[in-house]
Image: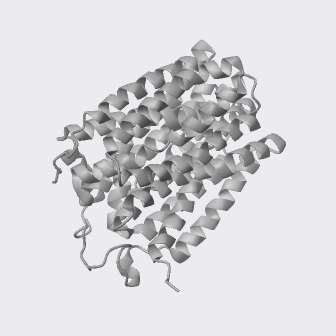
Amino acid sequence: MRRIHYSWFILIISFFSIIVAGIIVASSGVFLTPFEKEFGWDRPVISIAFGICLLFYGISGPFMAALLEKFGLKKMMLVAMATLLIGLLLILLMNQSWQLIIIWGIIIGLGSSLFLTVLSPYVANHWFKEKRGLATGILTASTAMGQLLLLPVLAIVIENYSWRWAIGLICALSIIMFIIILLFIKNSPKDIGILPYGQTEDIDELNKSQNGNPIAIAFNGLFVAVKSKEFWLLAGSFFVCGFSTNGLIGTHFISFCISFGIPLVTAASLLSFMGVFNMVGTTLSGWLSDRIDNRWLLFWYYLLRGGSLVLLPFALMDGNITWIMVFTVFYGLDWVATVPPTINLSRQIFGLQNSAIIYGWIYAAHQVGAAAAAYGGGLIYKYFNTYTWAFFMAGVFCVLASLFVIVIKKQAKQVVS
């Protein structure tokens, strides 16, 4: 019987680690209203804490990539999971809004950064020679899996008990993953005497690991990237991606539904239902990114997403559950589908050695957009008593992003340091 290559075990553990980190960040939409009710904090104040989290984990990404190269996969995953666990425990003790901003915004933002930014390309690059696009798609889809499994559960726990019990549930999952990482994660295939999946010769594609100062390594990657027009086009499109996904939908979709009379559990279930199709769409996108021009994949992803966001407010106003379900399915298929082709384009343009760090900077732009939508959505609701204009704005931005990606040269010259 043929043995399963250990690369797939690394992928599975990484998959579930990303699920835990992803559900912590995605749960902001479930906790927004309970925090507002219990503590009496304004929605923009709570939104800015969630926005800082999105921003902080994004801008930390390039430095996490450099730290991965310096300290290895296992140590970094353990430290990141421990940081998340500490943040969750501190949330149980908070009673002031500034504490929420520090704990959720900075500590949880920092702890989630490794898992939600550069872990997917790092594992794909170091553990896979073949099926890198598929591996990236599977890992990216894991954030959706967390929504699918846990958002409705968290909402039910909050409604029947309290938000503190929901935090306790996530803490338990974090402890389980910390133990699994400690026991089974390896830094590289060489640690266990094997080659990356699909590689037949002992050739180090990634050359030597970068052992310098992680901050210098991260900024050197940025200095290489900013000279390229393609970097700005990818970063600009990913800004819009973050604005229109975890910034707007992830933070405010549940509250938007509640404002139209949809119950919390139903709204959370709709968001988790997106996760079902998000998982399918992102895995399929990883498979397609190995076979189809990645620019055209991104063009259609952004264009179709923009149309769906513009139509959502009309579906909610009419209370038409059929059209709301159509949006849920359609948007779910498209949510994180942009990530595998963006990573592939980064790899093609900047090379395998530089791609993880430079993708980290591109993802930082994604999270700047997410933070802008998380905070901006709260402001728009405060002043207009509706999220409609925020969704219209996101739809228009997505159309612009579709134009950004299509002007990238088909076979851009590889940029190297």
The residue drawn where x is 57% and y is 55% is: 19
Q: Position of residue 226 (x, y in %)?
A: 21, 41
The residue drawn where x is 42% and y is 33% is: 302
Residue 411 vs 194, above or below: the answer is above
Q: Position of residue 385 (x, y in %)?
A: 63, 15
Q: Position of residue 96 (x, y in %)?
A: 64, 36
Q: Position of residue 306 (x, y in %)?
A: 47, 27
The residue drawn where x is 65% and y is 42% is: 273
The residue drawn where x is 49% and y is 49% is: 282
Nearer-the-camera pick, 119 or 322: 322
Count every numbered label the image shows and give the total.
0
Kindly indicate the quadrant of the structure image that contains residue 198: bottom left
Nearer-the-camera pick, 356 or 106: 356
Nearer-the-camera pick, 323 or 178: 323
Outermost residue on the right side: it is 160
Nearer-the-camera pick, 139 or 157: 139
Residue 90 vs 271, above or below: the answer is below
Kindly indicate the quadrant of the structure image that contains residue 234: top left
- Tell me how the rendering is colored: one colour
